Image: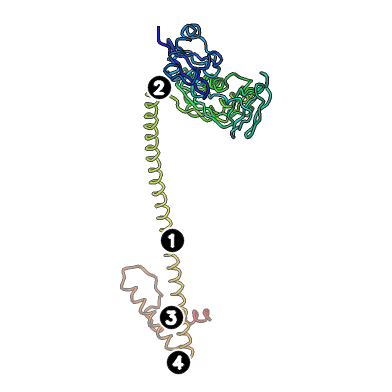
Amino acid sequence: MSCPVFIFCDNGNTQWPIFFIACDKICHFPPQTYTPTPQMLTKSTILRSQVARTLTKSQNAITKSTSTQYRGFTSMSQLMAPPSATSASLNFFQNKSLPANTVVKFVPQQQAWIVERMGKFHRILPPGLAILIPLLDRITYVQSLKESAIEIPTQSAITSDNVSLELDGVLYVKVVDPYKASYGVEDFQFAISQLAQTTMRSEIGNLTLDAVLKERQQLNTNINKVINEAAMNWGVECLRYEIRDIHPPQNVIEAMHRQVSAERSKRAEILESEGNRQSKINISEGEKQSIILQSEAEKQEQINLALGEAEQIKLKAEATAIGIKRIAQAIKETPGGESAVNLQVAQEYIKEFGKLAKESNTVVIPSNVGDISSFMAQGLSIYKNLNKEGK
């Protein structure tokens, strides 16, 4: 038989055991069960005396747990073991002891204390000073009004395309109705944690793997909405839900890596072909612009040449006209000038006929070419007729 061990509490006047540990079990004994021990005894004597007096009662009390604060633990192994995924909300350190039922109490800020009078709900104590009636009033629940985070343990879920995922998350909640949080559900943290897990599995089942990875924010919003619909009756508001990690199977991860590599190779080939296409287009556009510019240059060159020739002809004509005008004016103003011009014309006429005779061409000449005087008279008459027409 294992040796029992007691943990004692000393309030100044009496000492009594709070916990009894034996055979890997934890039990709680109320102080009314034991007779107060005189203070003159040493603690070792008190311990031995209490062990001897309660050894026979411990066998029946091993499987009982009268403490409402620690009823979730029935063995030392459960107390020392880390919290599991299904009992995360039953953590030993999350269960706080209730305040002592004294007359004057000071409620801390952001807390709400539930007071029962003769076993029935009486009122909710707000922060500040509170007065209780001994023996009638009892503080039964203490609710924190602060925002708290509940860790959702890792769980498995299957997507609509039959891919198994491992997910975990964090749930942020806040008590908005202390009465419902105390009487509407046994343990709202545990209940809302379980609800978050089932809701997550349900929502994951409606999406494919790609949708889960792309639409995480929408998934968080849907889970938060479903949780709030159920938590309304518990006096708790789910502020937000965040999926922390998503772990696909290893073969899926490898397939995703291959897909990413193939996508990158495809993108690189597309970019390369687009680059070649754009390069050819740019070269063709450059050649086209070059031809257009060259033709425009040739056109402009021809226009410039034509304008130059026209300007040249115009200038020559103007110069010739000015020269003729000056010659005519000089002939008119000079005495005997007209006779001199007639003589020069006759000489030029004879000179040109002389050039025709030197060439081997058949030409028609006047019949009186041998008569020099008549020939010169004919040339002068032609000049005079032209001169009259010019006037």
Q: Which residue is mark 3?
A: 379
User: Which is more foreground, mark 1 or mark 2?
Assistant: 2
Q: Which of the pair 199/311 is nearer the observer?
A: 199
* Quadrant containing the N terminus in the rendered view: top left
Q: Position of residue 82 (x, y in %)?
A: 43, 20
First of labels 3, 1 by sequence position: 1
Left-right relation of 116 to 151: right
User: Which is more foreground, mark 2 or mark 3?
Assistant: 2
Q: Residues within 10 Å of mark 3 (few under 14, many from 20)?
A: some
Say the numbered circle drawn on residue 300: 1
User: Which is more foreground, mark 4 or mark 2?
Assistant: 2
Q: Which residue is mark 4?
A: 336
Please identify the residue farthest to the front as the structure is shown.
Answer: 40
Q: Residues within 10 Å of mark 2 (few under 14, many from 20)?
A: some
Distance from disc 3 to disc 4, alpha carbons, whole Å, reads: 18 Å
The reply to whether residue 324 is in sight is yes
The quadrant in which residue 251 appears is top left
Distance from disc 3 to disc 1, alpha carbons, whole Å, reads: 48 Å
Query: Could you tell me which secondary element the residue under label 1 belongs to?
Result: helix
What amino acid is at disc 4? Gly
First of labels 1, 2 by sequence position: 2
What amino acid is at disc 1? Gln
Q: Which residue is mark 2?
A: 252
First of labels 4, 2 by sequence position: 2
Say the numbered circle drawn on residue 373: none
Query: Could you tell me which secondary element the residue under label 2 belongs to?
Result: helix
